[in-house]
Amino acid sequence: MNSNVINEVRDALKIQNATEKIPNCIPIIEVGYKATLPVRLASLTKSTTGTGDIIATTANTKQLYIKYVSFSMIKDATCDVATGSLSLSATIAGAVKEIALIPVITLTAQSESINIVFNNPIKIDPNTAVTLGAQTFTAGVLVRTAVIGFFEDDYVKG
C-alpha cells in the first residue's frame, strides 16, 4: 500500500502511531481514496468531414478512468453521411471498445444527445487515446460534440 495513503488514513481516522494500528479495512479506504481524485474535463467539437479525432490521451505513467460522458450530434437533412452510427471509443483491456454510440440516418435531420455517468469508472489502457470516430460526408452539416469527465492515478502494472 502507498505510504501516502497510509498517512492520509492515519490522519483522517486520528490514529496514534505509538498506540493504535490501522484497522483491516484498507481496500475500502483505497476505493474511497480513488473516488476523491480530481475530475478533469476534455472536450471536442467537430463539424468537418474526415478522420477520427483524439479527445484525450493517457500517459504511460498514469492510469486514466472515465467517470462520465456527454455525447451529442446535430445534422441537417442535406447531410449525406452514411446511415450507421457516430462513436466514442477507447482502448480497454487491450481492445478498442465503443463507449457511446449515436445512430445516424442519411439525408434526415437529426439531433441526438446521450449522457452517461459510470458508477464504476471505466479504466482506459495506458498510452492510448479516447477518440471521436471518423465520419465522411460531402454535403450538408454534421456537428459532433463529446465531453468526458475523467481522473488519473499513478499507473501500477499488474
Image (cartoon, rainbow, N blue to C red):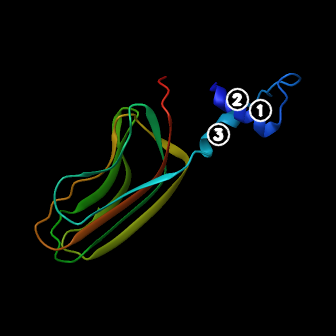
Which residue type carries mark 2?
Answer: Ile
Which residue corresponds to the image point at 16% horizontal and 76% vertical from the top-left?
78
2 or 3: mark nearer the eye: 2
Residue under numbered circle 3: 33
Residue under numbered circle 2: 6
List x then y, in percent, for residue 38. 55, 49
Residue 61 circle label = none
Would residue 105 appear left or right of 65 to someone viewing this image? left
3D distance between C-alphas at marks 1 and 3: 13 Å
Residue under numbered circle 1: 10
Label 3 sits on a secondary structure element that is helix
Do tag 1 and tag 2 residues touch (Cβ < 8 Å)?
yes
List x then y, in percent, for residue 120. 56, 45
Packing grade of label 2 (10 A; few <14, some 14-19, many >=20) is: some
Packing grade of label 3 (10 A; few <14, some 14-19, many >=20) is: few
Of 145 and 21, nearer the camera is 21
